[in-house]
Image: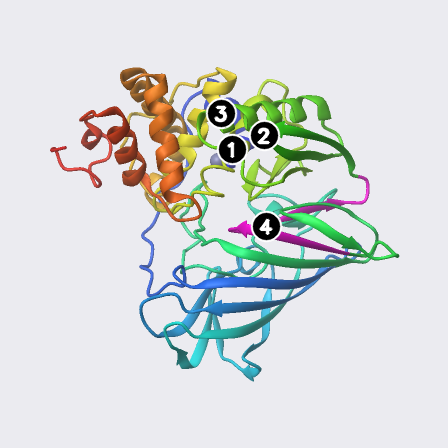
Amino acid sequence: VIRSFGRLPLLVALLLGPGLGGAPVGPVAAASNDSLGLTATYQVNGHFSWANRSVAVETTVNVRNTTGGAVGSLVFNLTPLRLSNAVVGRATVDGQPATTTTNDQTVFVTLAPSLAVGASATVHIGYTATLNSNSSGNRWLFARTTVLTAYRWFPWLSRPINWEGSSDGDPWETAISSQVNVSLTTDRPLTIAATGQRTSISADRLTQAFVAYNVRDFNFSAAPDYRARSQTVSIAGASVKVTFYYRTLSPAPVMSWAIAALRDYSAKIARYTYPQLNIGEIDGKGDPIESPGHFWIPAGTSSRLLPWMVAHETGHQWFYAVVGNDQPGQPFADEAVVDFMARNLVNVWARSKCAQENLDQSVHEAGACYAWVIYVQGNLYLRAYRDYVGDATFWRGLANYYAAYRWKIGGTRQLLDALDVAAHVCYPHWLRFPSLYSTHC
Ligand SMILES: [Zn+2]
């Protein structure tokens, strides 16, 4: 994500001006349990009204207990709980009514009896909500203005992560699902940019079905007046269909930078993993943000910043989508790496306007300097490291980290260790990552 970067005044400030202001960040409640060790597939029926913005979503989750112990409750993230008037309705477990509670963006479903190790359950959760009619703050993640945008809009197994105090970071962490089937019904025909591939469309064009494999999330944007520019390219021997759904942005530079980034990262790290990359233009008040096999770029993005933004969001296909991480707890592991990859490709580097800070901070700790520290100081840290160990060695280390944590959850320490192993160096990471390293290699 490029959250604070995407808002133009902040973006200009980030590249040119003084540091960001902002309130200090409060403490965060500790997680009491989590569902990241469970395995799940999702079947989702979403009804979205363009006219009156009403939303009704029915989600069926087939859960298998792949943790080491019995599980007494399931923990889902559902972002519309924080961004709209969403209300969780009926829930069942194996057809029997189940108790749910909600807190912040999290839905807890009680399992009674608890789910034994290796056992499976079918969980059904319904909710209704209204899409926001303006895109201010974070409302653009679940809104219908000129474009309909829905981000983390159905319950996905996670752990309790507070939205509060997450500054401009991403307050999410999710495990891979092997298969997600989504049916979207709308009150008028909409062109949809989504994670995964469309598998069918009804004769009246009001219901469209999608499937996605090996994803941590399924998001979409939609508009009645989207135009689409598609190109199928061969990336490291595999066919990839890149499509940009746009209204106002010029498609050529978005397409060419996305394809250039796919080629560059495929050559340096590993081949791009999905058969498609779908890019959606969203409301100009939104920010660029990543999804698996998919990302959004806001209207009004300047031609100066667009290459970096497209390269950054494309990079998240490697780090966030395939190699996951604790996004709020260890944002360096995806944001710094992806920003380094992007800036290395476009060869435009920013200078931090915040004083040097540690790079092991969480989004809840980093506060107003989050973007300057994690993205800018982070990518410069990696550039200095790359210059120290050499280009080929650096990329070999990053490729090793990717291979080791493909479809899993990596982290900052695992990343830096993989780089050091490839380079046979003792680099003083403890100076900037004191919580992760002692002063000995
Ligand atoms: Zn990002």
Give the dominant element type of the magenta stretch: helix, strand or loop: strand
Q: Reading the chain from its start, which is encountered first: label 2 or label 4?
A: 4
Q: Reading the chain from its start, which is encountered first: label 1 or label 4?
A: 4
Closest to the observer: 388 or 395? Answer: 395
Residue at x 72% of width, y 26% of height: 251
Residue 65 appears anywhere in the view: yes
Q: Is residue 18 above or below residue 94?
A: above
Q: Is residue 63 left or right of residue 136?
A: left
Q: Picture coordinates of residue 247 (x, y %)?
A: 76, 34
Amino acid residing under circle 2? Gly
Q: SS of the residue at dot 4?
A: loop
Mark 1 vs mark 2, CA separation in Å: 9 Å
* Contact check, label 3 and label 1, Cβ < 8 Å: no
Mark 2 vs mark 3, CA separation in Å: 11 Å
* Contact check, label 2 and label 3, Cβ < 8 Å: no
Q: Residues within 10 Å of mark 3 (few under 14, many from 20)?
A: some
Residue at x 71% of width, y 22% of height: 252
Residue pointed to by mark 3: 267
Residue 151, which numbered label?
A: 4
Q: SS of the residue at dot 3?
A: helix
Amino acid residing under circle 1? Arg
Q: Which residues are magenta?
A: 208-225
Q: SS of the residue at dot 1?
A: loop
Q: Nearer the viewer, mark 1 or mark 2?
A: 2
